[in-house]
Image: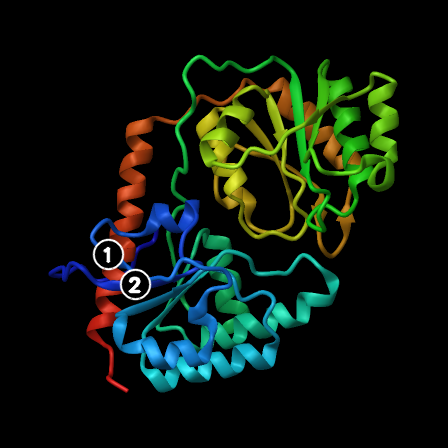
Amino acid sequence: MNAAVPAGPRRPGLRVASVPFGGPYVDAVLPADAVRVGPATTPSPWLDPDHLRASAAGVDVLHVHAGYEDMSARELDAWTAAVRRCGVPLVVTVHQLRAGRDGSRSRHRAHLRALLATAEVVLTLTPGAADEIADRFGRTAIVVAHPSLAAPTPGIGRETRLVGVHLGSLGPQAPEHAGLVRGALSGAVSGGGRLRVDVHPGVDLAAGFPELLALADAGDVELHRSAPISPAEWVRHLQELHVSVLPDLAGSHSSWIELCRDAGTRVVVPSGGHHAGQWSDVVVYGSDAATGLDPTSLSSAVVAALTRPAPARVDAAWRAEQREAVRAVHAQVYEQVAADRVPA
């Protein structure tokens, strides 16, 4: 973890407005002595220039993680202008460097340009992402590790050679569903295993993915309907698997990798983004937003994942220390930018 922030005397009780207000990652990185400023509503009112101007005096730091994706480029430009006029120190964590939908990619680039031009400090999760931020936007980003989000559930063991793909609601992050399932199925069978595909209970597969229903009816895949909500529920789900396939085509980082890490589940990740920089013990397959999915590469990656020993679950004490170190970096950043604040 590259935490190039000068250490110094701490000023506890800094008032932090996070966007979004909360969530597993936001909650994990927020320093224990920070005062979280609400309200806890979605979309965040802190992305409204009028609310920002009226409430700026009540916060010391504004930290944006996400939540701005549906704003137009002009709206976000107006918002960053309001941030500068109000003098509120802005911290930005770059989780995703590219948008998942073709129509929003140029808007996402414009969003990042505006945010990173305004931010006092930029954070990101991997060295590769920091290099890309420097190349594309001319900003130096502090690299902080992605913290653990949940501990494994005692007594839950993996099923040997069970490969899992969780497609959720069949959203745009995995547009090549059929190729993804075929590639994972080929790898599972070649590796002497079997494939379980999970989808959200509310999905109409007859309309959205009839091929998956046909594979399930033929006994080629195990079809499950599940929708875990909390990180602990997700880790419990992943503990049952030998291998989990991450289907995200456009993402830069993923909490899924960290959940697999804590569950002790081998994870197969797409080549696009910086997933391999989060955890060295992953298997990579060919898939990114520019070139699409390579099912043959996915099949080979699943075979490789099945033939390796399952990774050991990480040491809980070490993960707790890592989370505290991540919070300490955030505390130092908040202290630094609050001390440098120029009143509007």
Say what secondary structure mark 1 lies in: loop
Disc marking residue 34: 1
Q: Is residue 245 left or right of residue 311?
A: right
Residue type marked 2: Val
In front here: 292 or 209? Answer: 209
Name which residue lies at 78% across and 25% down: 185
Q: Is residue 106 left or right of residue 230?
A: right
Q: Which residue is mark 2?
A: 16
Q: Is 72 located above or below residue 310 in the figure? A: below
Which residue ends up furthest to the left in the rendered image? 9
Name which residue lies at 39% across and 51% down: 26
Say what secondary structure mark 2 lies in: strand
- Using the rendered image of the protein, determine whether residue 138 is visible from the camera's viewpoint: no
**Residue 73 spot, x, y in % from top left:** 60, 77
Give the colour scheme of this rendering: rainbow
Q: Earlier in the sequence, mark 1 or mark 2?
A: 2
**Mark 2 neighbour density, 10 Å: few (under 14) some (14–19) many (20 or more):** many
Q: Is residue 102 left or right of residue 304?
A: right
* Quadrant of residue 174 within the rendered picture: top right
Name which residue lies at 62% across and 60% down: 98
Quarter of the image for the C terminus: give it: bottom left
